[in-house]
Image (cartoon, grey):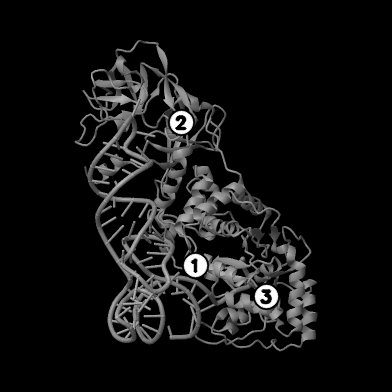
Amino acid sequence: MGNDKQAPPQEAQIIDAEQRLGSSNFIRHIIEEDLETGKFDGRVETRFPPEPNGYLHIGHAKSICLNFGLAAQYNGQCHLRFDDTNPLKENVEYVESIKEDVRWLGFDWGAHEYFASDYFDRLYGFAIELIKKGRAYVDSLSPDQIREYRGTLNEPGRESPYRSRPVEENLQLFEKMAAGEFEEGQCVLRAKIDMAAPNIVMRDPTLYRIRKVQHHRTGKRWCIYPMYDFAHCLSDSIEAITHSICTLEFVNNRELYDWILDALEVYHPQQIEFARLNLAYTVLSKRKLIQLVEEGIVDGWDDPRMPSISGFRRRGYTPAAIRRFCDRIGVAKRDSLVDIAMLEHCLREDLNTSAPRVMGVLRPLKVVIENYPEGQVEYLEAVNNPEDPSMGIRQVPFSREFYIERDDFMEAPPKKFFRLAPGREVRLRYAYFIRCHDVVKDDQGEIVELRCTYDPETRGGNAPPDGRKVKATLHWVSAAEALDTDVRLYDHLFTVENPAETEDFKESLNPESLTILTGCKLEPGLKNAEPGAHFQFERLGYFTVDTRDSTPGKPVFNRAVTLRDTWAKIQKSGK
RNA sequence: UGAGGGUUGGUGCAGCGGUAGCACGACGGGCUCUGAACCCGUUAACCCAGGUUCGAAUCCUGGACCCUCAGCCA
């Protein structure tokens, strides 16, 4: 039951593109203007260019939705290109996880799967061309010297003594670099631009460096690897990208992007920068995320508290919810911090229509119905999803002994509490009206059981002939038939809105980000729920079957998000 | 103090010279066999100061504040 139905990728893209039609942003303005002026012959070609050195997170999802969404909307194509120019940090495991995550999000790059490393030969050729044009040189300064010579934000840099090497010498040196005749750090290839440029990026940036390590795709073929600035613009050019969309921290690099393409006189895409996503109460920098994983603060990249795509997936988020979220937060150039309430809203919105309802008691309180026959079990009809009648009905066992939520009973209820209390009558969802008569306590005074009576005339949860009304409906699970299992609840990983802003972001970790509940009582039909399936536990929230810790016959559940809870709000506001 | 980006309700995004709008949130009400969902309503914003104009969030000038850049990372 409740298997995770995913729309085929193409369909997902089309549907979302239609939804997006309403909202406008500055990138669309640019594209539409380009379409009008015929700047790129009416083409729209984008790319999502991850470096395979880590897992994708919700910030990448924003970029993925943007790039694939734009391509779909303007009948273009979006390429998936791995920016694998630094073999020190990259590996195939990441390549695979990235592909899985993009696919899971519902996007299809078709045949357009590329690797910057596939262009290494051509890139090498471009480098030689630059040298021949007198626009690049091999520098033999040490890394420290290069830094010294670069100058500072306020002072211009100085030219390297090797800057004026003749073309022939540069050519020979560069060939030797590629042939492995120099050690790492001994020399680099630099663009010859302007050491006094006000934009530091333009002070003779490094184009190639020596790295005597194997590359996960090209093996031992190379010992020199191109830098981002050199590889990226040329990869875009080779693939005939029209709009190369990246985040704001690359604004300064655009001047270099343009310089390289102009110097080589090749096809020239347009780089456009937008603000990266920041989400409240979490961190979205690869470096920090890696730290959480490596220091064992979380259980891995797919820990449900992680803002990684795999984390959200395991937590119980859906691709549609994440896509909708990305559409709604919009795209702009100013730094912002998005409220997680927005994300949670998108999940609820999606799951409300698609997730089967089910009853589960997280913190059980036993109830005995004194006037219900001992040993009797009857099956009552429950609706699978009131939002979607086509999802049908199911039978739920009811008997003399069952569990309700501890929170649903109060011995001395305050004014606005209208659930169960001594002497009070409530409805059991789809079952009967019951009235509480006695409270059984143990030696410590802890409530261990409620003694109630039921009204047979309210079978199915219907109002009795005398028209008696009840102010609350509770969920419940029959004791003997209940599935006994674990449920995990999650809260923000951090206690402050913007942990990245604090001195040490780990200082503000939330010690209560994970709560493991054992002995939860769920309706028996859940016994064979498939890993990854989504459910709404009525009155509680949306839960998913954990894909890692569940075993056949004993699914373990993760709470993805709570339902909106007016009662909790009343309590918090102090009645 | 160099260069480049940015500043619209609590949050995110529109508005591109003509009554400042959408979503989320918050608050109130309706409906309800989920205190959910749904429906209805309320709240609340143009960084500041000048200027241009019949009219400025939009154009101009000056200022304030925030962000990015000194990797052989991306």
Asked if residue A394 is positioned above or below residue A174 in the image, the reply reads above
Q: In the image, which is nearer the foreground, mark 2 or mark 3?
A: 2
Tell whether A356 sits left or right of A227: left
Distance from disc 2 to disc 3, alpha carbons, whole Å, reads: 62 Å
Asked if residue A450 is positioned above or below residue A373 in the image, the reply reads below
Residue that carries the numbered disc 1 in the rendered image:
A26
Secondary structure beneath label 1: helix
Q: Residues within 10 Å of mark 1 (few under 14, many from 20)?
A: few
Secondary structure beneath label 2: helix
Quarter residue A168 falls in = bottom right
Residue that carries the numbered disc 3 in the rendered image:
A207
Which circle's residue, 2 or 3, is located before the other in the chain?
3
Residue type at the position of mark 3:
Leu
Quarter residue B14 falls in = bottom left
Residue type at the position of mark 2:
Pro
The image position of residue A345, as x and y in percent, is 41, 47
Residue that carries the numbered disc 2 in the rendered image:
A389
In this orientation, which residue lies closer to the viewer: A360 or A109? A109
Secondary structure beneath label 3: strand
Distance from disc 2 to disc 1, alpha carbons, whole Å, reads: 42 Å
Distance from disc 1 to disc 3, alpha carbons, whole Å, reads: 31 Å
